[in-house]
Image (cartoon, rainbow, N blue to C red):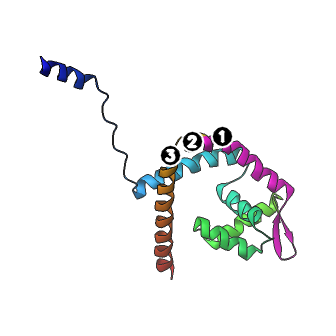
Amino acid sequence: MTTTGSTKAASTAAPAPAPAPAATARELGLAHYAARGVLEYVLARHGATFAQQIALRAAINADAPQTPDELVAQVQGALKADPAGIRAVLDELLAKELLVADGEHLRPTEAGRELFAAVAAETAPISARVWGGIPAEDLAAAGRVLALVTERADAELAALTA
């Protein structure tokens, strides 16, 4: 009878949770594109692109107005994109009057700041739902892994382009 009781108890127990997938390049890429897809959807509703948002963020978050070359370098560091393409993005932001030339520097306009704030306000609750409930220790571990992957990939790209 003890055997029957043990079998019954074992059959009513919840199944063990599936192990989490390993953090592979594919998994990291899928997470990136899932989050980027959300941002690009929001940006499209505002008539902006991902690259424009990255360039606008660099201009807004700078301590002082940046030259076009300085902005190109910052955006290239983030996107690993061709400098000519980034210059085209800066031209688009100037044409949309989201950036303005101020002597040799570019600075964000009020419209650029408003667009950036609107996108941030719209994506904040989505980000809270995506990131909410993840334990701090998991976020810290993920942060360490992502920083290391970024450092290594940057070094590999530098070696390839040297």
- Residue linked to disc 2: 132
* Mark 1 touches mark 2? (CB < 8 Å): no
Give me the residue at 67% from left, 60% from top: 54
Distance between mark 3 and mark 1 Cα atoms: 18 Å
Q: Residues within 10 Å of mark 3 (few under 14, many from 20)?
A: few
Please identify the residue farthest to the front as the structure is shown.
2
Q: Residue at x 15, y 18 (%)?
A: 4
Indicate the secondary structure of the residue bearing disc 3. loop
Residue linked to disc 3: 135
Task: Name the front one of labels 1 and 2.
Answer: 2
User: At which x and y percent is residue 40?
Assistant: 63, 49
Pointer 1 residue: 125
Q: Quadrant of residue 1?
A: top left
Q: Amino acid at mark 2?
A: Gly
| Nearest to N terminus: mark 1 or mark 2 | 1
Q: Nearer the viewer, mark 3 or mark 1?
A: 3
Which residues fall within the magenta stretch? Answer: 100-128
Give how far across and how far down residue 154 sits, in percent: 51, 72
Q: CA distance from mark 1 to mark 2?
A: 10 Å
Q: Does any portion of residue 42 appear in the rendered image? A: yes
Tell me the number on the disc at residue 70.
Answer: none
